[in-house]
Every structure is written in structure tokens, then in C-alpha cells.
Image (cartoon, rainbow, N blue to C red):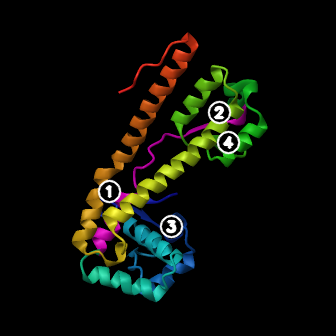
Amino acid sequence: MSSERAGGGAGGARYRREEVARAAGVKVRNLRYYQERGLLPPPRREGRIVWYSDDHLVRLRLIDDLLGRGYTVQGIAELLAAWEQGGGIAQLLGLEREMTRDWVQEVPVSMTLAELRELFGPAATPQDTRRAAALEYVRVEGDTVTFPSRRLLEATVALVRQGVPLSEILDAGEFVQSQAAALADRFVALFRRHVIGPEGLGRLSAAQLEHVTEAVAALRPVAGEVVTTEFARAMARRVDAEVASLLHTEPRTQQ
């Protein structure tokens, strides 16, 4: 993407028409339609070039989400107008940014297929690569392979070098993915039920939206800490039991 940083602007990055449409996952022709219907503020014009901001991008994603939830264009326009009149649109856009940012902090790693084969040796088969791509552990584009997570790559290489078959690592990865999805569903359901409330965001005041935004910032690290702590406790119990079995002794009681 060739979007630029807006010098000193509050909106952060700025995008050309095609760029903001692509980032939001909408058709370019929808931008003018949304502007005509009052859903999207006009972009900033510099000569013949129009620039869209991060706020435009957030609002486009919000519009797309509401459309997906069954709202009509007119209904979305009325909803956004009500939020703007109540002073809550800034809090709403800030909430969307706070809820979606920084969950994944990874450094991607790219290499050629030849380098991939050299890294894993005979342990990796074309079938393993296809399965890893299906699980989104890798992206293959021509002769380039990209691992979105350096940490997962390093963990996989370490296991392979200890003799664990790559196919079984992928089995474990698929299982972990399913369990992680279930945990994410549980945490999101708890947050929606007890922090946002049964009526959703549509009826929250500006003050309530600000409260939810603060709650998101406070609770984001909690989910990861709970999972990390509980997994460490489970591993301690399981490894202790395994060692006890190997030594034919009784396992210690974990606190």
C-alpha cells in the first residue's frame, strides 16, 4: 500500500480512493454512494487528489459490519447521525480502534522455497506445506514463503530438530487453534454480556462508549495472562505426573 502519513493530522495515515476501499474491503464505487447517503464524510482534496483518513477507514469498516448485521443503508445513516448529534461518534470510532488493535504483535519471516527446504530438510513435505498454508501458518506466493509469526516458526523448527514429525506438530497446531477459538468466543461473550450490555453499541451514550473503550484497554492483557497462567499450571501438573510415572513414584500435589 502506498498510503502516506498525514503530516501532523489527527487521522494518522491517509489513503487514496483505491487504497482506502481495498483496506476496508469495499468497492470503490461505494465510497461516493456512502457520501451521497450521508454515511461517509467527504475526503480532503489537494488539487486533483482526494485523501481519506484513518477515520474514514474505521467508518467504512463499521458500515460494512452493520450492513452484514442486517442494517439498511438508511438505518445506518440514522444511527450514525444519532451518534454524531449525541457527541458519541468520536467515542465510537475510538472504541473500534481500541477493540481491534494490537491483539497480534508478530514479526513475519519470508524465505524462498529453497530456503524452506534447507531449514526443515526432509521433515517437510509438500503436503505439510499445503496443510500449514490451510492453517494460515504460512503464505505461499510463487517462490516466496511467509511465516506471519516468527515465534511459531522458531517453535516449529525447535520441535522438528528434537525429532517431532512436522505432521504431528500441525495436528497439535490445529487442535490449539480450535481451543483458542473457543476461548476467544468465551471471553468475547463475557465482555459483550457484562461490559457492553444486551442492547449493543447502538444505544450507548458517549460516556458509556468511553467507558467501554477504557474497559477494552484494561481487559485486553487479562485474556492472554489467564490463558498463559492456566496453561503453565496445567503443564506443571502434567509433566509432574509424567515424571512420577517414569520414576514409579506418586506425583507431588500442585498448589
Residue at the disc numbered 1: 216
Q: CA distance from mark 4 to mark 1?
A: 32 Å
Which range is magenta?
89-114
Q: Quadrant of residue 191?
A: bottom left
Task: Look at 41% across and 79% down and name the residue there.
Answer: 40
Looking at the rendered structure, the secondary structure element under dot 1 is helix
User: Which dot, 3 or 2, sits closer to the camera?
Assistant: 2
Q: Residue at x 64, y 21 (%)?
A: 161
| Amino acid on which disc 1 is placed | Val
**Residue 228 showing in the rendered view:** yes
Residue 73 rendering spot, x and y as whole percentages: 48, 85
Closer to the observer: label 1 or label 3?
1
| 15 on left or right of 203 | right
- Judged from the image, the secondary structure of the residue bearing numbered disc 4 is helix
Q: Nearer the viewer, residue 168 or 47?
A: 168
Q: Nearer the viewer's eye, disc 2 or disc 4? A: 2
Give the Cα distance between marks 2 and 1. 33 Å
Marks 4 and 3: which is nearer the front?
A: 4
Report the disc number at residue 169: 2
Q: For residue 218: magenta?
A: no
Label 2 crowd (10 A; few <14 / some 14-19 / many >=20): some
Amino acid type for the residue under numbered disc 3? Ala
Q: Amino acid at mark 4?
A: Ala
Badge number at residue 111: none
The correct choice, above or below, for 137 with respect to 236 in the image is below
Which kind of residue does numbered mark 2 sit on? Ile
Residue identifier under label 4: 132
